[in-house]
Each structure stands twice: as structure tokens, then as C-alpha cells.
Amino acid sequence: MIILSIESSCDETSVAVCRGREVLSNIVATQIEEHKKYGGVVPEIASRRHTEAISQVCDEALRTAGITYGDIEAVAVTFAPGLIGALLVGVNFAKGLALSLGVPLIPVHHLRSHIAANYIAHPDLKPPFLCLLVSGGNTVIAEGLDYTHFNILGATMDDAAGECFDKAARFMGLSYPGGVTLDKIATVADREKYPLPTPKTGENDLNFSFSGLKTAVINLIHKANQKGEEVDIPVLCATLRQKVCDILITATLKASERKGYTKIALAGGVSANSELRSRFEEECKERNLELYFPPLKYCGDNAAMVGVQGFYEFESGNTAGQDLNATATLPINYNS
């Protein structure tokens, strides 16, 4: 089944053509350089750039895949969660395309797509498994019960891990995207020089909290500036990265042990973090756990992962009509 898929939830306009787990093309038009001067994504600008780029990106995806519009058997699109204006561009384009071609319209949840990025590179990965989904907007530990049903075991109570990285990096004066820059310049952590707290999450020890950690970094820099002291930014970056990775890995392994999972999948933009990947590999190897994470090119937002997840959504009977609307917030287990 040939599916044309569309992703426009934030600042990447992407269209892909997939056949099951096989990616025939995946075109991404990024807006990073434009948003860099503002230190983060400006929603109105993102929506306008999606509108300007989507037709051209779609045509390029078809050319690269070597197919025509007549070969498309279904259209999949990210409908939630994300920036509402940005989502609407993709959703409306997909609705018009599906209507004109007379093919099914498949609504795809953005977080499920990130998990599906693993299916592209790992043909052997099949549910059930445990997943840590960690990005700029979400941090979730979930059971993948099957391809379209999930059970949330823990989630962030405030900021996401990627948001903590991005906001702390911005305060350090690092360029956007902050989390990526922080990972690149980080050297060796020094917890004695820069002690950072371990957030408390109440009764559910599989939940996360990163707001206080972000604030601790900001306060640390404030105090140093007031005293006229210089902050070693690469060391502070490494110390923050280590602390966030500690929190993410500890909770995920705890969930794995409690639920008896031997397969763990990482997903989301922060799954590209170098320390998170390497330390997870070490920890899983020690415990004889199977670890999966996407290739770096599929960690960020892209339409290939939407197309692959769209295939499984279609197989489960999840299609939409012309009344499909974008939704800014929606849990990954919305239909479970």
C-alpha cells in the first residue's frame, strides 16, 4: 500500500512516500535558520512557511519516489499534538488531497509517529515493548501494547526534557536549537562545581519534572554573574546533560523491571542526544535488554515516520472524514 504522508506539527514541512515500513522518499524543508534569530519557534511564522512550502515539498516527494498522484492509495497526516496553526496547514492540505484523489485519509498522532521511526530501521521490532518518548514538548514512558494502543506509565508534570535543554541553553547564550548545541559543546560533567537538584515527582516515581532543574541552571548563572564569576558553559552543559540522562534512564529501567519488558525503544528528538544513546546502550547491555533507537535522520520531525505509523493506523481501521481537525494537545493513548 502506497501512502503519502504529511508532517507540519512544528517547524519542519515534510512529505514522504512509504510502502509499509519501506520509505520511498522523505523530503524535509526546515525552518531552523529563520527561527534561530528569535531563539525559538515563532508559531505564526512557522504556519506561514508551511503554507508556502507544502505544495513544492509534496511534488518533490513524488518525484523522488518515482510515482505520480495516481499511484497514491492513502494520505496520512499528523493531526495532533503540535502548534495548532502549523498542524492546520498539513491537515487541510491532506484533506484536500485525499478528497481529490478519492483515497482514505489517515489521522496520525505525532508521538506515535516518533515511535514508528524505530520501525523503519528495525524490521524485527514489534510490540509489545516499553518506550521512552522524549522531545522538546513531551516526555513519556509508555507501554506499546500493539501498534496503535499505548499505556502511559509516567509523564512529565511540567517541562519536557527537551524543553529543559532548550531553555537552559538559551539562557547560557547558546544558538537555537539549544538542545542540539548543548550536546555538541558539552565536555565533562562536574557535579561538585555545579550541583544540580534531582526533582521530586510525588507518588508516581515514573513521572518526570524538569522545570526546577531548568530554574536551578538559570539561578546558578544569575548568582555567578552577580558575584562577577565566570561560568564554564561546556562543563555546565555536560553536568545538566548528565543529570537529565540520569533521570530518564533510571525511570525507564525501573519501569522495565516492574513490567517485565526486555525490549526498550527510544523515540523523539532528544533520542538523538549522544550521552542518552551511549549510556542507554551500556545499561541495557549490562541487563541483557534489547535497545532500539532511530537513526539520527529520523529522530527529528519527518513525514516518513508518519507514513509508517499511518500504515498501522489504517490496518487497525483508523481513518477520518473531511471533518478531521487539528488538535494542539492529545495524549498518546487517546483511543486506548
Image (tube, grey):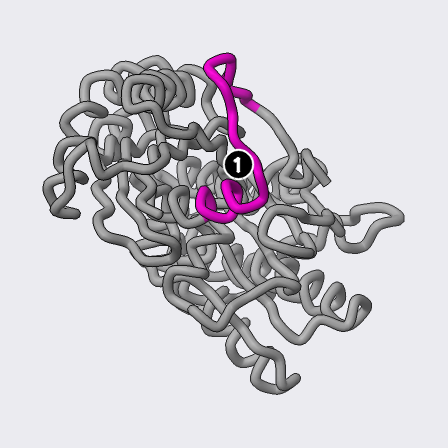
x and y percentages locating residue 105 in the rendered image: 43, 28
Q: Which residue is depicted at the point 33% across and 37% down?
A: 73
Task: Kindly indicate the quadrant of the structure image that contains residue 159.
Answer: top right
Question: In the image, is residue 189 above or below residue 110?
Answer: below
Is residue 92 found inside the magenta-colored segment of the image?
Answer: no
x and y percentages locating residue 188 in the rendered image: 44, 69
Question: In the image, is residue 288 above or below residue 24?
Answer: below
Whether residue 221 is visible to the viewer of this picture, yes or no, is: no
Q: Nearer the viewer, residue 328 or 40?
A: 328
Q: Which residue is depicted at the point 38% across and 57% down?
A: 21
Q: Nearer the viewer, residue 304 or 209?
A: 304
Q: Which residue is mark 1?
A: 109
Q: Nearer the viewer, residue 221 or 209?
A: 209
Q: Which residue is depicted at the point 52% across and 73% down?
A: 279
Is residue 324 found inside the magenta-colored segment of the image?
Answer: yes
Magenta residue span: 309-328
- Local crowd at mark 1 within 10 Å, few (<14), some, or many (≥20)? many
Task: Kindly indicate the quadrant of the structure image that contains residue 174.
Answer: top left
Main secondary structure found in the magenta portion: loop
Whether residue 105 is visible to the viewer of this picture, yes or no, is: yes
x and y percentages locating residue 302 in the rendered image: 33, 43
x and y percentages locating residue 20 in the rendered image: 38, 54
Mark 1 element type: strand
Say which quadrant the C terminus sits in: top right
Q: Which residue is depicted at the point 52% across and 31% down?
A: 319
